[in-house]
Image (tube, rainbow, N blue to C red):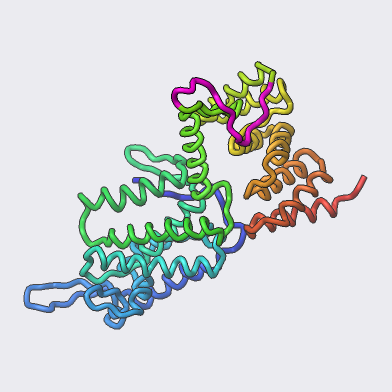
Amino acid sequence: MLLPIRTSIRPTRTPYVNYALIALNVLFFAVSYGPHTFRPMPGQVVHEPLRLWAQQFMLHPTNPYLWQFVSYAFLHGSLMHIFGNMYFLYLFGNNVNDRLGNVGYLCLYLAGAVFSALGHMVFGGIHPVLGASGAVAAITGAYLVLFPTTLITIMYWFYIIGTMELSALYFIAFKLIVWDNVIEPNFASRGVAYDAHLAGYAFGIAAPLLLLALGLIGRSHGDLWFLLRQWNRRRRYRDVVAGGYDPFRGAVAAPEGRGRWVEARVSSPEPTENSQAVQLRSEVLSLINQRNIASAAEKYLQLVGADANHFLPLQNQLDIANQLMSAGRWPDAAAAYRVFLAHYDSYEHAEQVHLMLGILLSRYLNQAQEAITHLQRAAERLTDPGQLQMCRDELEKLKAAPKD
């Protein structure tokens, strides 16, 4: 048995809508739950979880009314049913509410309920359905998109009891979606609308991805859209290298039969006569391709020691700077971020790099004037409310500090 008990992030603002949705679900459960039995025919006993007046608000796929596409999501058939749904809504919904804002989060929740109901009907569901599971699945899917690299602490108990941490991407994708809703139904008891769950997850993943792609919500270096773009950059890089591109000289193989190299007009560091730097650069890129960023960062420091003018391709330079930052190598991290901004200041998310460098200079290196410059650059372009507030708070603290 695996039970997620907490996530590695906390909302920066109070998730009022999520709290309200949990309260409404509990309230409707309290007034609608009334298990009873009746005998429609001699010898036949039917167990009903709801009071008679509430049954019209379940979704009846064979004869649905419009309100049922939303009302069914506020009804539950047992204490465990509502507890499980509200537990997961609280666990994942608070941060999604924080990221999307109150209006956006409410729209996602209600649209997830509607889309889950449609999925249940389209895939052949004929029995009445109730419960917030589909809407909660949409919120959980949105968490996977917005915070895939965060860690979820999971309590397990088999022969022993303990905890472990898994990334949200793997836990939600493989445990909650694939195992619980694709594999488990093959040997689990019926009575669960797995198709509604899957439709909810599909909507919860697709909608935020589309919003990120269109730039309608703030992007970050930790969301799924960024990870997909990063993967695509690496794929394209591997394809270009496999096709004969020399990342050190900006040259590609000549057409077959010409037997020589021709120069390509590509953006790349200038050739260097420092053979040691060339070798070190090759080792840095090789370690990055092996996903060994920690060792690549150490080798990068040797590289800039051998040739201070050297810099890496955009994503590689940023990965190294982030690694040095996470390792607490503050001066080295600041230097790597400065190199990045010196060569890639037109990067579409450069404001987030300015924010990171500004905070690093302010909090760890006591370089207030340069920190203010970078934070002001970040404040001009930041769109994420939480990051913008953090930037402004840091600027106010720096400007209020006594001058020497």
Q: Residue at x 26, y 48 (%)?
A: 183
Along the line of sight, which residue is nearer the eye, 307 or 163?
Answer: 307
**Quarter containing the C terminus:** top right
Q: Residue furthest bottom?
A: 53
Indicate the position of residue 350 as horizontal and vertical percent values: 66, 47
Q: Quadrant of residue 274?
A: top right
Residue 257 in magenta stretch = yes
Extreme residue in the top direction = 275
> For residue 129, what is the image quadrant?
bottom left
Q: Residue furthest left?
A: 42
**124 up-or-down from 250: above or below:** below
Q: Is residue 99 magenta?
A: no
Nearer to me, 394 or 264: 264
Q: In the displayed structure, does residue 381 sit left or right of residue 18?
A: right
Q: Is residue 131 visible?
A: yes
**Magenta stretch bounds:** 256-272
Q: Is residue 182 above or below residue 385?
A: above
Q: In the image shown, does 238 or 64 lie closer to the viewer?
A: 238
Q: Position of residue 368 (x, y in %)?
A: 82, 45
Q: Residue at x 30, y 83 (%)?
A: 53
